[in-house]
Image (cartoon, rainbow, N blue to C red):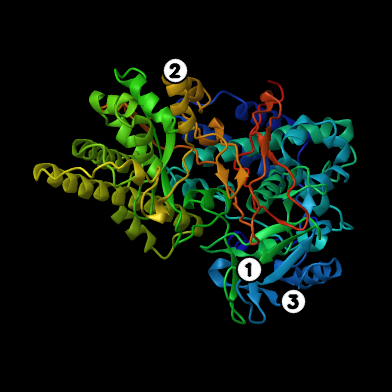
């Protein structure tokens, strides 16, 4: 993928040996592990901790200078070997070539006309680097004993990559030699470049990403030096922080989920050649063919000869792209700013509001998004804000009034306001919240635009400032849009305009009329609840039971269906950042929230069968890893959607805990 490969390449041979005693290095490693395993810093002290960890890492890097394994030549020198290796092992190599696209870096260029939906690229399983191939490699003995490797496939893949890179006879060497020598992820930012991300939603993830990478490095450095099953690893004499940072970034920017060979579960994989494709807006066009046991990609659109071939990485925000892919996408149709909203439990009407929200399948506290497109809020957020701003009488109407159960379906529909007063309150609230969030930034939008005009700005600084500016522009649009809506509904109220009449036959569910603004909402089985009310007279009790199955405060809805697949969204995927202030209505608003777990949400380009059942398997609690979603095997000969499931942060508790 070109955006991640624009910087330096690997150049020299094995490099000179730095003079440092093993004891001195181990002392530094122990200090780093201790620092990274300490309790989270208090609010406002995150930058101080980050700088301290960076200082220790830089001491270690200085002493390890020249120890990393590198290759003679540039990436481009090895592209012919990559293509020859791919052709020899059954990959498609006709119709495209690898080319340099300036700012976008290396990518695939059409060498002939390619039609939309034409299958032009396939990669057989034997070419993929997977967790399974890692188990069967020199890493296998350590994998069988180390709980971190067993629990975290992304870490296993990173070490698999390092071990194969150090082996001159590795089957995957033609692929590894074409990987970037460095990346543009924040792990490679200088301290002053990270400063530009201060106040953005990305900053907490950047801190965590660096801290967890440093902690893992320190832990595995000790393992490699002391564990008997690590004695045969080619890393024992040279395992540097730069090595691990490179491997982590390679995996973080490239890993995908594919079915295992028997199709019973999914595994992580690196996919040579295909991962050269750059991103654009569109649809997912990659799947896995279990019958032929290969991943396949069809063309996103018509491509003329010499045009760049793109794929769609998924509906990621620019914060996700910057943190986990190392680039900012200028025309990102899916950019958004996350906000955390909640009904305060101390509010007098909390129980009633929580009940209405529960009936709509919306948590009383959750992370929502303000979008770059119109309308800036989803149907789910609109529904939440309407309930959030309801009076006691309005809440009673939606709980026990005429057609109360059915009216829940209209909460997210712009055509059915609760009342003019309610609309005025919710848009006033949104305008105020967006304005307050804008004040948390240390620079204005105009100041950022002026900074971007400086010709001497580093690439990383430019990316960080673009991200910062994009967030502000979304908030500015939300504030101005809220103001316009407020004024519109104020006029409707003053003119005595009648509310649109509610017709039971015209229920449009919790969706806005604009198809681009639809966001799935998990609804209760309201028909069953209504029937139970009639038959058993226990509707409220039934809803309470169902509401207990909803996520805890701060969690998003559990296991929503994405492209026909189940995806577990957990609280640690949406860990809130610095808390905001209590609202006038008793609600909470927080900024700096951790972004939801994403990755390329691939859509099959063949006709899809009904969604397959998904199950969730948890690793031991003490590892602090995220539960993986295992999806059962679809019928053979059917393409199975998959894509880079970016495991954003490499979490685990210190082994001593």
The image quarter in which residue 434 lies:
top left
The answer, for residue 495, to whether it is visible in the render is yes
Which residue bears the numbered disc 2?
538
**Residue at x-position 38% and y-position 31%:** 405
Q: Distance between the residues labelled 2 and 3?
A: 66 Å
Badge nearest the viewer, 1 or 3:
3
Badge nearest the viewer, 2 or 1:
2
Residue 84 drawn at (x, y percent): 82, 72
Left or right: residue 577 versus residue 9 is: left
Which residue bears the numbered disc 3?
94
**Residue at x-position 53% and y-position 38%:** 207
Residue 106 disc label: 1
Q: Are marks 2 and 1 in contact (CB under 8 Å)?
A: no
Quadrant, the C terminus: top right
Residue 95 disc label: none
Residue 648 drawn at (x, y percent): 59, 43
> Upstream in the sequence, badge 1 or badge 3?
3
* Mark 2: secondary structure: loop
**Residue at x-position 72% and y-position 64%:** 273
**Residue at x-position 25% and y-position 39%:** 432
Left or right: residue 114 versus residue 144 is: left
The image quarter in which residue 123 lies:
bottom right
Residue 19 drawn at (x, y percent): 76, 43
Total numbered badges shown on the rendered structure: 3
Nearer to the camera, 581 or 468 = 581
């Amino acid at each position: 993928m070109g955006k991640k490969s624009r910087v330096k390449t690997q150049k020299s041979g094995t490099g000179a040996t730095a003079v440092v005693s093993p004891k001195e290095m181990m002392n530094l490693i122990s200090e780093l592990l201790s620092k990274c395993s300490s309790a989270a810093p208090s609010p406002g002290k995150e930058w101080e901790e980050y700088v301290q960890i960076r200082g220790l890492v830089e001491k270690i890097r200085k002493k390890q200078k020249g120890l990393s394994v590198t290759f003679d030549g540039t990436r481009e020198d090895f592209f012919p070997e990559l293509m020859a290796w791919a052709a020899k092992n059954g990959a498609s190599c006709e119709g495209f070539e690898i080319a340099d696209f300036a700012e976008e870096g290396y990518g695939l260029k059409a060498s002939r006309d390619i039609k939309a939906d034409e299958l032009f690229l396939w990669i057989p399983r034997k070419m993929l680097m997977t967790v399974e191939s890692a188990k069967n490699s020199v890493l296998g003995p350590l994998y069988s004993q180390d709980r971190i490797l067993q629990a975290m496939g992304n870490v296993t893949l990173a070490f698999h990559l390092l071990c194969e890179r150090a082996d001159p006879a590795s089957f995957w060497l033609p692929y590894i030699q074409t990987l970037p020598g460095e990346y543009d992820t924040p792990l490679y930012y200088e301290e002053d470049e990270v400063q530009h991300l201060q106040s953005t939603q990305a900053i907490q993830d950047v801190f965590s990403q660096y801290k967890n990478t440093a902690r893992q490095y320190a832990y595995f450095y000790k393992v490699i030096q002391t564990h008997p099953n690590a004695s045969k690893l080619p890393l024992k004499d040279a395992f540097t922080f730069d090595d691990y940072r490179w491997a982590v970034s390679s995996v973080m920017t490239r890993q995908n989920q594919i079915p295992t060979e028997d199709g019973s579960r999914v595994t992580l994989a690196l996919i040579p050649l295909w991962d050269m494709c750059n991103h654009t807006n569109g649809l997912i066009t990659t799947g896995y063919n279990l019958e032929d046991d290969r991943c396949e990609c069809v063309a996103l659109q018509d491509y003329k000869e010499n045009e760049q071939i793109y794929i769609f990485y998924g509906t990621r925000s620019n914060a996700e792209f910057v943190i986990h892919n190392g680039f900012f996408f200028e025309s990102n149709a899916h950019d958004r700013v996350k906000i955390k909203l909640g009904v305060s439990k101390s509010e007098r009407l909390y129980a009633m509001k929580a009940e209405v929200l529960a009936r709509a399948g919306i948590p009383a506290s959750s992370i929502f998004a303000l979008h770059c497109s119109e309308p800036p809020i989803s149907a789910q957020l609109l529904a939440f804000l309407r309930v959030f701003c309801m009076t006691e009488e309005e809440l009673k109407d939606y709980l026990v009034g005429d057609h109360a159960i059915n009216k829940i379906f209209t909460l997210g529909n712009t055509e059915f306001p609760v009342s003019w007063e309610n609309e005025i309150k919710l848009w006033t609230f949104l305008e105020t919240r967006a304005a307050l969030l804008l004040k948390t930034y240390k620079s204005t939008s105009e100041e950022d635009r002026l900074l971007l005009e400086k010709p001497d700005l580093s690439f990383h600084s430019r990316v960080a400032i673009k991200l910062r500016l994009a967030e502000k522009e979304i908030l500015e649009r939300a504030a101005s849009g809220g103001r316009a809506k407020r004024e519109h509904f104020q006029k409707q109220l003053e003119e005595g305009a009648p509310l649109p009449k509610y017709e039971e036959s015209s229920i449009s569910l919790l969706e806005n009329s604009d198809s681009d603004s639809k966001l799935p909402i998990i609804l209760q089985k309201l028909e069953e609840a209504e029937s139970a009310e009639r038959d058993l007279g226990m509707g409220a009790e039934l809803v309470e039971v169902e509401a207990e199955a909803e996520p805890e405060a701060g969690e998003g809805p559990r296991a929503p269906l994405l492209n026909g697949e189940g995806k577990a969204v957990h609280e640690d995927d949406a860990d809130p950042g610095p808390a905001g202030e209590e609202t006038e209505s008793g609600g909470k608003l927080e900024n700096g929230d951790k972004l939801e777990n994403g990755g390329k949400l691939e859509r099959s380009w063949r006709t899809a069968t009904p969604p397959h059942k998904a199950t969730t398997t948890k690793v031991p609690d003490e590892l602090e890893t995220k539960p993986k979603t295992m999806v059962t095997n679809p019928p053979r000969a059917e393409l199975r959607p998959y894509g880079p499931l970016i495991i954003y942060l490499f979490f685990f508790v210190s082994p001593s805990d």
